[in-house]
Image: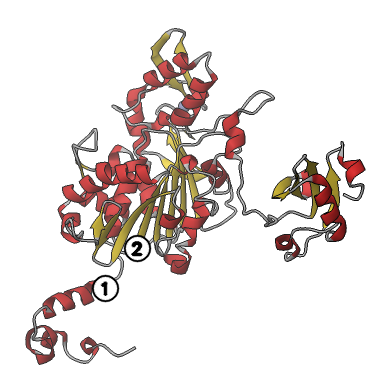
């Protein structure tokens, strides 16, 4: 690499007198050069948000200056996303209405203003990504002067700034949907924001798990990368965010009892009320059993802190869980939570929604028969003729019809897991196929594309019936 002049000449010469820099645009080039050399800011994300983030009346119920003190539990989570913190993966399993979306938007703003780099923000679908861009990202940029100056203005013929991509000095924000493999593979990204991951499809365009695809974009950034996974959970066993949380250090927000001082994390079972009177809801301390009124929550949140309750499988990952019991005063009250609970009784669907969106916990499916959605979501996809990893041997079954033979080739793995690997239709009348089979194919023969992978059929099966007389060899 050539040595830049700035290391040889005094800096003042460069800007004021050196002839080499007396041309149109020189100042702009120097400014960009300087910006490129600027290290990431020491400012943490929460400090930046308190100074610079304005909440738009278009997108926020509480327009005006953002205050981390309003949702104190978001402070640590946001600061993990700051470049000065070594954490690479941040997992947040949460209820609705706890302020996570604004924290994610703060991160986007911070990355544009303070620590530029390529960023990928993923919503469950491309449609949702477009809506999010219009309703949240545009106001985020428009309402904060620092951001407005840095992001290229949208012009109809400017490819640098479209609904799904925002270019800024030193970086670009790409927004896409988890249903688009093309979008997920678009560019290497230092920052990856995976929002509502439990609503992602099992596979993006049949190319595999969208979270894995997206995260792969960040690997070249090594220790400088940040991945933020956020979601309200769904069903136990299928929930991505719960799986991630359980592999993390499982942080809970501990708050002190105003009466005895015991620090504890808030649990729905300790919310008590008189039957039929949700307005009497109070929280009962697990140390002294004294009821705590909701107005005391503000002080409790101020004094709260996150504590790990497990050892993370990966030391580079931290995980947080938060229920709506922590919602600040004026958002979702304990009384409304009790009303929602009472109203949900008698309906599995309503209780599931309560657990997911208010407690931020998964729902355990009951009953013998899984519902169609559960089965449907467990689909895996692979290309015909390819034996998935885990397939140990193949069997084939032939269904003989009057004018064709249909052959299914199955791969079998441990625990009797099986995959339909290929479906072959041999057209023609039965006696001709029988002759062809006798002439050409041995009974253990497999289709050429499987043979190239080194597979043989362990046992060809056949549908019992009329085939035996026509072709006893199959
Ligand atoms: Zn107490």
In the image, residue 468 above or below residue 424: above
Say whether residue 288 is visible.
no
In the image, residue 33 above or below residue 414: below
Look at 29% across and 90% down and name the residue there.
3
Residue under pointer 2: 118
Return the disc, 2 or 1, that comes first in the chain's sequence. Answer: 1
Q: Position of residue 240 (x, y in %)?
A: 54, 43
Q: Foreground: 311 or 417?
A: 417
Q: Quadrant of residue 255?
A: top left
What secondary structure is found at the residue carrying circle 1? helix
Label at residue 36:
1
Q: Quadrant of residue 30?
A: bottom left
Q: Foreground: 445 or 414?
A: 445
Q: Quadrant of residue 85?
A: bottom left
Look at 29% across and 41% down and name the residue there.
69
Q: Foreground: 396 or 167?
A: 396
Left or right relative to 474: residue 77: left
In the image, residue 87 above or below residue 320: below
């Amino acid at each position: 690499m050539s040595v830049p002049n700035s290391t040889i000449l005094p800096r003042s010469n460069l800007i004021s007198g050196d002839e080499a820099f007396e041309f149109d645009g020189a100042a702009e080039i120097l400014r960009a050069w300087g910006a490129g050399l600027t290290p990431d800011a020491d400012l943490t994300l929460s400090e930046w948000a308190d100074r610079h983030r304005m909440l738009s009346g278009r997108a926020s119920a509480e327009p005006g200056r953002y205050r981390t003190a309003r949702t104190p539990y978001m402070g640590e989570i946001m600061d993990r996303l700051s470049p000065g913190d070594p954490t690479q993966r941040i997992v947040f399993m949460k209820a609705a209405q706890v302020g996570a979306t604004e924290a994610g938007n703060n991160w986007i703003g911070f990355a544009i203003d303070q620590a530029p780099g390529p960023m990928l923000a993923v919503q469950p679908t491309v449609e949702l990504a477009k809506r999010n861009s219009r309703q949240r990202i545009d106001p985020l940029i428009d309402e904060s002067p620092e951001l407005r100056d840095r992001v290229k203005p949208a012009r109809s013929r400017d490819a640098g700034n479209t609904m799904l991509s925002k270019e800024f000095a030193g970086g670009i924000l790409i927004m896409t949907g988890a249903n688009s493999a093309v979008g997920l593979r678009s560019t290497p990204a230092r920052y990856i924001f995976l929002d509502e991951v439990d609503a992602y499809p099992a596979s993006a365009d049949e190319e595999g798990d969208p979270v894995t695809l997206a995260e792969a974009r960040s690997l070249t950034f090594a220790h400088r990368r940040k991945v933020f996974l956020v979601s309200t959970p769904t069903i136990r066993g299928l929930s991505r965010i719960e799986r991630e949380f359980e592999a993390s250090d499982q942080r809970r927000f501990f708050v002190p009892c105003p009466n005895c001082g015991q620090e504890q994390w808030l649990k729905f079972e300790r919310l008590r009320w008189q039957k039929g009177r949700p307005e009497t809801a109070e929280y009962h301390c697990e140390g002294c059993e004294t009821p705590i009124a909701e107005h005391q929550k503000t002080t409790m949140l101020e004094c709260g802190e996150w504590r790990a309750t497990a050892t993370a499988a990966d030391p580079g990952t931290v995980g947080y869980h938060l229920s709506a019991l922590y919602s600040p005063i004026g958002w979702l009250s304990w009384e409304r939570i009790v009303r929602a609970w009472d109203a949900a009784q008698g309906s599995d669907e309503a209780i599931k929604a309560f657990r997911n969106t208010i407690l931020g916990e998964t729902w355990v499916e009951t009953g013998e028969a899984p519902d169609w959605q559960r089965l449907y979501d467990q689909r895996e996809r692979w290309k015909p003729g390819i034996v998935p990893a885990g397939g140990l041997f193949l069997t084939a079954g032939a269904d003989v019809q009057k004018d064709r033979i249909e052959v299914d080739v199955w791969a079998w793995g441990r625990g009797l897991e099986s995959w339909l690997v290929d479906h072959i239709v041999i057209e023609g009348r039965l006696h001709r196929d029988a002759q062809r089979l006798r002439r050409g194919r041995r009974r253990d023969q497999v289709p050429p594309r499987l043979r190239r992978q080194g597979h043989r059929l362990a046992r060809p099966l056949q549908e019992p019936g009329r085939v035996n007389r026509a072709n006893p060899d199959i």
